[in-house]
Image: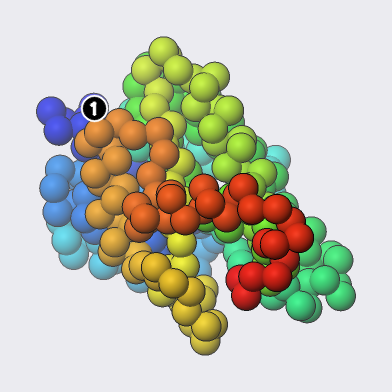
Amino acid sequence: MKDAFGLPQSLLVLGGTSEIALATVRRLVARRTRTVWLAGRPSPGLDTAAEQLRGLGAEVRTVAFDALDPESHEAALGKVFAEGDIDLVLLAFGILGDQAHDEREPLNAVRVAQTNYTGAVSAGLVAARSLQAQGHGSLVVLSSVAGERARRANFIYGSSKAGLDAFAQGLGDALHGTGVHVMVVRPGFVRSRMTEGMAEAPLATTPEAVATAIELGLRRRSETVWVPGALRVVMSALRHLPRTVFRRLPV
């Protein structure tokens, strides 16, 4: 169960090598969290992440999970929930893709969509049903400001995040009053391995800053978290610009 401050004692990360997710887990382990499940494709990176968290004093287990294999999600997540209640599920997997290349290779674009959206729909519904069955818990979904309005420079990724964001909001509404809390997190440009080598966008942030915002959101039981917070105003303005104006912007 969550502690008196609304922080989880046990959590499951879907996307166990995500830099944002691991920064969040480290922060929560430093507070109250003691049991951590890292779900992801078996890899040295997943094993290393688990060992590092064990070094912080957490009990850490790994479970094989593939966003592109929805038929396996029921069994993979069922294995975790069969071991005991989970206070927090952090849905953190996703890929950026290569916009220019993926436009020329539609199957690559489909892989981005299947990972970021359809994989998340499957895993999110399975996790939500398990949380609802135990009667409590939070589902935190890592979305992106890219989903607020698709840009020419990354509309494939942006459209997949737009779908994820809408799904998570609807799921939160469907679960309202059940004891399950859904929180959508919308970071801007995050300095990470995924964005390494890319031109940095204004109001760029870090995995640690996103982790801090997630913790605060959990304490407040927020439904939507923007990182940094100023992006809420910026994206509200961009979202309402006429397309003839928006397409001329250097974004």
Camera-side residue of 91 and 71? 91
The residue under the point 48% across, 74% down is 201
Q: Is residue 222 visible?
A: yes
Mark 1, residue position: 1
Q: Which one is nearer the viewer's eye here, 212 or 63?
A: 212
Q: Residue at x 68, y 57 (%)?
A: 150
* Residue 25 at least partly seen: no
The residue drawn where x is 30% and y is 31% is 221
Q: Amino acid type of disc 1?
A: Met
Q: Is residue 218 left or right of residue 243?
A: left
Q: Residues within 10 Å of mark 1 (few under 14, many from 20)?
A: some
Structure colour scheme = rainbow
- Position of residue 135 relative to residue 200, above or below, is above
Residue in the image at 70% along x and 70% along y: 248
Could you say which quadrant of the image residue 179 lies in?
top left
> Residue 133 at what x, y percent from top left?
45, 17
- Most foreground residue, 92 or 98: 98
Name the quarter where the N terminus is drawn. Answer: top left
Relative to 3, 52 lies left or right: right
Q: Position of residue 49 (x, y in %)?
A: 35, 66
Q: Give the secondary structure at mark 1.
A: loop
All told, the count of numbered labels is 1
Residue 95 placement, left or right of 127: right
Going by the picture, which residue comes out furthest to the top? 177
In this view, 123 is above or below 47: above
